[in-house]
């Protein structure tokens, strides 16, 4: 679907080449227990990428917007079947853990995202479903997670063997971690998942994977008609149909097992822009159907560009700070 590594996914490689991460919070690496789950708030957990894109302090974002949950990206392979932030930073004891501690200390919590477009993928580096489940379990245990996002893209997504390995690994994770919420996030066409996406969902159903949210990224379409908001709705309707067919769900249940992860402002494709109006369209759809998730890439980009601003750290459109996050946070499931 993509001819080059776009900003949504490419940042992981750039950050993985350098272990430099700005200190994000003052608190130390001591683990902090997860707070009780606030009803509905997990459904609105925008991505923040702590390894690149001049990340804001998550607690500052919380104070400015009211958001309580973040999806923190990305966990990759260190070259083997071992998870690290961007493939290079240890799970515990560093700035990433300090950021999570600070979020929880302020009454929030995190979903952690595994994968992305670039870098070494655990789904490929782990040779079996059980080994991959073990790698996912390391991430879950490190932070006592309530939710895990598998952002399956690029070579992980295009390989049928790896797709099945990911699904089977998640089935093990769900069995061994009762109550864990899992999302599987993938690219899409304007009419819904492509053949690989539909196959992934079918494999999940065949394996008996009770996945909480099949999530699409409705951007980088390579062409679409109408607004990005209407194209997103079309993609979500196609996703709902695929999930309904694979699992045999009724309409209401199918809607409650789909989700969206949009991109704010200018996307990776010239001429493709997602506006705050589009976000409002998506919000209306989410509220109408009670979908599993409404997220976007990314908090880093939720601000207007200054002179020479990078697309990894600003939206490319005229906006007030956190204009997109303030729309997403209105969704409560």
Image (cartoon, rainbow, N blue to C red):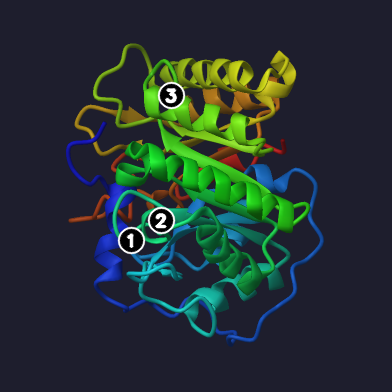
Q: Residues within 10 Å of mark 1 (few under 14, many from 20)?
A: many
Q: CA distance from mark 2 to mark 1?
A: 6 Å
Q: Residues within 10 Å of mark 2 (few under 14, many from 20)?
A: many
Q: CA distance from mark 1 to mark 3?
A: 29 Å
In the picture, the disc for residue 300 is 2
Image position, residue 194 (x, y; %): 38, 23
- The residue positioned 48% from the left and 47% from the top of the image is 165
Q: Residues within 10 Å of mark 3 (few under 14, many from 20)?
A: many
Q: Are marks 3 and 2 in contact (CB under 8 Å)?
A: no
From the viewer's perspective, is the residue at label 1 or at label 3 nearer? Answer: 3
| Quarter that holds the C terminus | top right
- The residue positioned 27% from the left and 28% from the top of the image is 272
Q: Secondary structure at mark 1?
A: loop
In the picture, the disc for residue 53 is 1
Image position, residue 93 (x, y; %): 53, 85
Residue 305 appears anywhere in the view? no
**Mark 3 or mark 2: whose residue is earlier in sequence:** 3
Q: Nearer the viewer, residue 74 or 129?
A: 129
Residue at which label 3 appears = 193
Image position, residue 284 (x, y; %): 62, 22
Residue 219 appears anywhere in the view? yes
Is residue 93 found left or right of 176 in the rendered image? left
Q: Is residue 135 above or below residue 30?
A: above
Is residue 212 found left or right of 328 in the rendered image? right
Quadrant in which residue 61 is drawn: bottom right
Q: CA distance from mark 3 to mark 2?
A: 27 Å
Image position, residue 142 (x, y; %): 61, 73
Quadrant in which residue 55 is drawn: bottom left
Q: Is residue 199 above or below residue 74?
A: above
- The residue positioned 50% from the left and 74% from the top of the image is 96
Q: Are marks 2 and 1 in contact (CB under 8 Å)?
A: yes
């Amino acid at each position: 679907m993509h001819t080059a590594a776009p900003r949504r996914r490419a940042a992981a490689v750039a950050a993985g080449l350098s272990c430099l991460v700005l200190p994000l919070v003052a608190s130390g690496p001591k683990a902090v227990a997860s707070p009780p789950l606030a009803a509905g708030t997990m459904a609105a957990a925008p991505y923040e990428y702590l390894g690149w894109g001049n990340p804001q302090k998550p607690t500052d974002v919380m104070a400015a917007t009211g958001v309580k949950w973040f999806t923190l990206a990305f966990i990759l392979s260190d070259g083997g079947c071992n998870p690290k932030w961007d493939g290079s930073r240890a799970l515990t004891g560093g700035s990433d853990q300090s950021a999570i501690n600070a979020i929880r200390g302020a009454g929030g919590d995190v979903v952690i995202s595994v994968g992305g477009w670039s870098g070494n993928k655990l789904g490929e580096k782990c040779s079996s479903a059980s080994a991959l489940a073990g790698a996912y379990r390391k991430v879950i245990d490190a932070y006592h997670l309530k939710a895990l996002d598998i952002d399956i893209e690029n070579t992980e997504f295009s390989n049928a063997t790896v797709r099945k390995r990911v699904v089977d690994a998640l089935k093990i994770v769900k069995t061994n971690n009762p109550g864990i919420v899992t999302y599987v996030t993938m690219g899409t066409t304007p009419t819904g998942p492509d053949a690989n996406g539909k196959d992934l969902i079918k494999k999940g159903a065949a394996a008996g994977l009770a996945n909480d949210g099949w999530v699409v990224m409705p951007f980088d379409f390579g062409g679409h008609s109408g607004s990005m908001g209407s194209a997103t709705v079309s993609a979500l309707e196609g996703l709902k149909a695929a999930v309904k067919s694979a699992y045999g769900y009724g309409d209401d249940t199918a809607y409650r097992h789909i989700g969206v992860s949009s991109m704010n402002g200018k996307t990776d494709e010239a001429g493709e822009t997602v506006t705050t109006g589009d976000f409002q369209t998506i919000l209306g759809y989410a509220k109408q159907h009670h979908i599993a998730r409404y997220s976007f890439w990314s908090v880093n980009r939720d601000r207007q560009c200054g002179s020479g601003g990078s697309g990894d750290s600003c939206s490319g459109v005229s906006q007030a700070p956190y204009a997109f996050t303030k729309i997403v946070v209105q969704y409560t499931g």
